[in-house]
Image (tube, grey):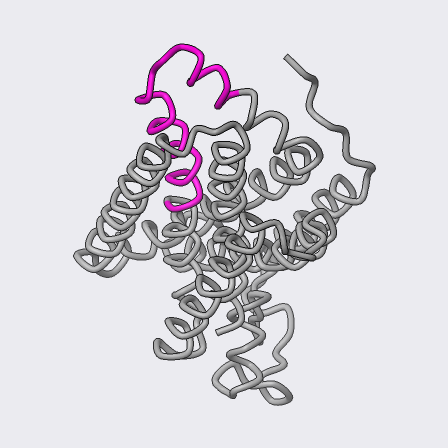
Amino acid sequence: MFSSLLITLREGIEASLIIGIMLAYLVRTGNRQYFKQVWLGTGLAVLASLIAGTAISVTAGELEGRAEEIFEGTATILAAVVLTWMIFWMRRQSLNIKASLQAEMQTAMQGGAALGLVLLAFVAVVREGVETALFLFAANSTAESPAAFISGGLIGLFLAVLIGYGIYRGTARLNLRAFFNVTGLLLILFAAGLLAHGIHEFNEAGLIPEIVEHVWDTNGVVPEGSTFGRFLTALFGYNGNPSLSEVVGYLAYMAVVFWAYLRPAKAPLAK
């Protein structure tokens, strides 16, 4: 539940932040007539995201055996890579995202191209939507239960919409930079778990050697099937008896990414 909530809350706030800034800017500049273009782009992005999520699920459901293991391993590792990129991208963009987005909107409106606002909203939201679909698919393989997973995702989206509305109304007191920093740390742990799970699937498919089949076995202490074990698996990729390649991949990822993340962030250069 917590893994899906974290994903949809984080991605939902990013999308809500962008839409909130766009709408607030249109109000402030007396261009409310462009609201429909922003909402049209947002609606098309949501539709495209649902189609992408459905395509991923249907493709996975038609595969069996080794092909399924390869597909799931590839999707999970890809999700870890994209999630890591997104964490660092948002960390940099959060320093001046408002000014950058407003400059792009001004350019679109000065050109008299309402289509530009539709595309701007679409591209901004569809990126978050497709990422969310990929992350949720990867996280679903380690979810505590389908009901808890879906509930967590819906709660995250609901909270993201509320925060986005607060940003638009100018009443939100959430420190977005602190929020993205804290959730970024949690998502790094989550991405490390996705990477380890992807390596596990490739171990099963015979694409990556295990080296040592089981480095340790803690299932006697914290069984993977227990409530706490499922929670750890869903959020941090817990495996009670991991292979050596899983352990090496997990620790190497954590060492490199945490080192890079804890370095001072630099704002992107202005164009």
Q: Is residue 231 placed above or below 84 in the rendered structure?
A: below
Q: Is residue 196 placed above or below 91 in the rendered structure?
A: below
Q: Residue at x 55, y 28 (%)?
A: 101
Identify which residue, 246 or 12, lies in the foreground.
12
Single out the residue that lies furthest toward the left.
Answer: 62
- Percent from the top left, x then y, of residue 201? 42, 58
- Percent from the top left, x then y, of residue 67? 26, 52
Please indicate, yes or no, whether residue 196 appears anywhere in the rendered image.
Answer: no
| Residue 103 falls within the magenta-colored stretch | no
- Percent from the top left, x then y, of residue 88? 64, 38
| Residue 121 falls within the magenta-colored stretch | yes
Left or right of residue 4, residue 256 in this image: right
Q: Is residue 20 placed above or below 109 in the rendered structure?
A: below
For the image shown, how many numbered marks are present on the structure?
0
Please indicate, yes or no, whether residue 256 appears anywhere in the rendered image.
Answer: yes
Quadrant including the C terminus: top right
Single out the residue that lies furthest toward the right.
Answer: 264
Q: In the rendered image, which quarter is residue 205 located in?
A: bottom left
- Percent from the top left, x then y, of residue 13? 53, 52
Q: In the rendered image, which quarter is residue 243 located in?
A: bottom right
Chain part drawn in magenta: 104-129
Left or right of residue 236, residue 32 in this image: left
Q: Residue at x 40, y 75 (%)?
A: 151
Identify which residue, 254 or 90, lies in the foreground.
90
Q: Is residue 111 placed above or below 262 in the rendered structure?
A: above
Q: Residue at x 71, y 35 (%)?
A: 95
Identify which residue, 27 or 110, lies in the foreground.
27
Q: Main secondary structure of the magenta part?
A: helix
Q: Residue at x 33, y 29 (%)?
A: 118
